[in-house]
Amino acid sequence: MRLRALCAVAALVAFAALLPLPGASAVATPPPAETPPPWGGPVPPSPSRLDGAARDSADGLYLHTDGGTIRDARGHAVRLSGVNWSGLETCNFAPSGLGQRSWWDVLDQVRALGFNSIRLPFSDQVLDPASRPQGINYTLNPDLQGLSGLQVMDRILAGVGQRGLRVILDRHRPDCTTQAPLWYSPQYPEHRWIAALVRLARRYRHQPAVIGLDLFNEPQPPVTWGDGNRATDWRLAAERAGDAVLRANPHLLIFVEGVGTIGPSGTHQQKADWWGGNLLEAGAAPVRLAVPHRLVYAPHDYGPGLSLQPWFSAPTFPYNLPAMWDHHWGYLQEPGTPRAGSAPVVLGEFGGQALAPDLPARPVPLGAPPAHTPTVAARAAADAVWLRALLSYLARHHAIGFMYWSLMPDSPDVGSLLNTDWQTANIAKQVALAPLQGAALPLPGARPAPAALRVLASDQVVSANQQNLTLRIVDDSPRPLDLRHAEVRYWVGRASERGALAPEQQRTADVDDASTGPGTVTPVAGIARQHGYVALRFTALGPTSTVLAPYGGVAVITLRLHRQDWTPYTPRGDWSFSPHVLPTPAPHLTLTVDGHLVWGRLPI
């Protein structure tokens, strides 16, 4: 995400080495041939396969700005509320987590959790055909096999649109290794940066799921704002790049981040901030684009758990934070304020390792004499309070959108939305984010919202007599799930003409462990629609032992499946058998609640 350890001296040395080297012009490549997605649904449309009607109507699906508000084509106010899914900006050239999960399952979960958008970081290097993805489990993601990094992006964006989600493409860094201080580098000069942005704007011109481009992630010293120096003035560079993008696609939103400092370096006027977070001068010197109603400011903000800022040591922390946010970037979307730049604000990155249950009754004592450094524990506690304060600020400022960093648990410095199992949401964070989420932004042809209840399975044959099956029932819905009303079925195969299972198809199960508690899961054998099954039913030993919490509650059941007499059998003919070592969505297992099918498919 960022290399905070870079010092100002190193940044200046890097700046001095920058030379305008020639870069190869980008040439668009055709999107990959479509293959059916593994869940068996319709093939996501790629930009090249949109018919004429879809091409003509696509322009009406884009968003635009109106003062400090983002609106859809009908004029309705839109709050972008999403997550950052990183990875394409790294040398893996693929979104993170695809070694543990399928890309379509990740998108389904993002949608099921109520988010309406994704910020997708990338590097210019991913556009190189030689950039081959790494870290992908192709058993879970067979349709990504053989694709380049850019083609993986194609596939992800098609799936985003199919789910009614929107995406902001974030040019995170020039190459895959370095977080650059400036928008250009020796290997990727400015004209190459702009060419890459224009290439993507053209490539996804008829993919309305792509709503905008974040021109460059986290400008930092020696970057300036508004001083007219072409080599460092980020405001002027954003105008050059933004206008080039809008010539290629005039319907995109242009997201512009702030800078790390304001004022001459080393002087008392210089004011520090997060990289990309300082928009103090944007009101007086706004970004000017040739196409109106396309500018969005996208600052970043983090807490004391990442790095100490002066305002964290104020005696009034955390109650000083709202005024600080107003001063640095919140003012830009407030109508009628003297410094208002008449542009919406979307908080492009923020996150924390933990979330305080509530704001404290008195300020957090983080301030200290200069020689004293707060302990790790004190900073972590203050960071949790900071995150609660920022969420409270967003709750009061409905026009400000947000993109949580990050979705996947690979940013230990700032935490994540998903837990370290890569599957379940952090309940405290999701419960806090859910009330702030904007409405869904549907797209024509998008599938209905995915199931908010999922069944994952890891299924292994361990001997000639049995298979080990670990099930995870995940609740991504906003409501708790009482498993006493639920039943999970593992389907075996067709029954004989007499209506009974043939001996070789008879199965039973022994539950070895259940996170709901010992004795709470009972296997029951049965026949339905001429198919045998082993059903798991739940009984409560206590008032809450079988209730899953909303937004990330999970029940884990480990069992052995075998023939009733323990004689050898092969499970490969079973309807529900799917040999995966990792937890994988299991659509051939069914979950019913009060008799209603909520997950999976019945045998055919």
Image: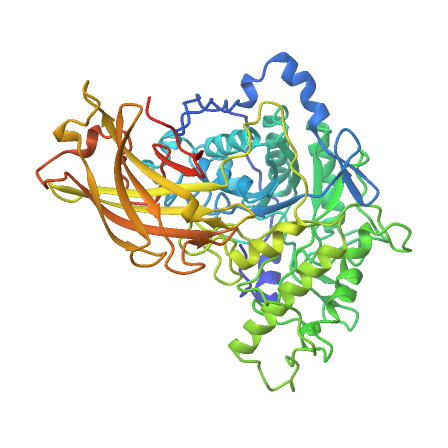
**View extreme (top): residue:** 52
Where is residue 397, by image quadrant? bottom right
**View extreme (left): residue:** 567
Type of colouring: rainbow
Judged left or right of residue 542, residue 293 is: right
Nearest to the observer: residue 1 or residue 228? 1
Quarter occupied by the C terminus: top left
| Image x and y of residue 121, in percent | 55, 44
| Image x and y of residue 117, in percent | 61, 40
Look at 79% across and 69% down and name the residue there.
Answer: 269
Look at 73% across and 50% down and name the residue there.
Answer: 400
Any part of residue 213 in sight:
yes
Nearest to the observer: residue 282 or residue 106? 106
Judged left or right of residue 447, residue 542 is: left
Q: Is residue 363 above or below residue 205?
A: below
| Image x and y of residue 438, in percent | 68, 43
| Image x and y of residue 297, in percent | 73, 48
Nearest to the observer: residue 452 or residue 423? 452
Look at 65% across and 47% down and name the residue there.
Answer: 437
Nearest to the observer: residue 247 or residue 521? 521
**View extreme (front): residue:** 498
Where is residue 276, by image quadrant? bottom right
Q: Is residue 488 above or below residue 247?
A: below
Any part of residue 123 in sight:
no
Judged left or right of residue 289, residue 258 is: left
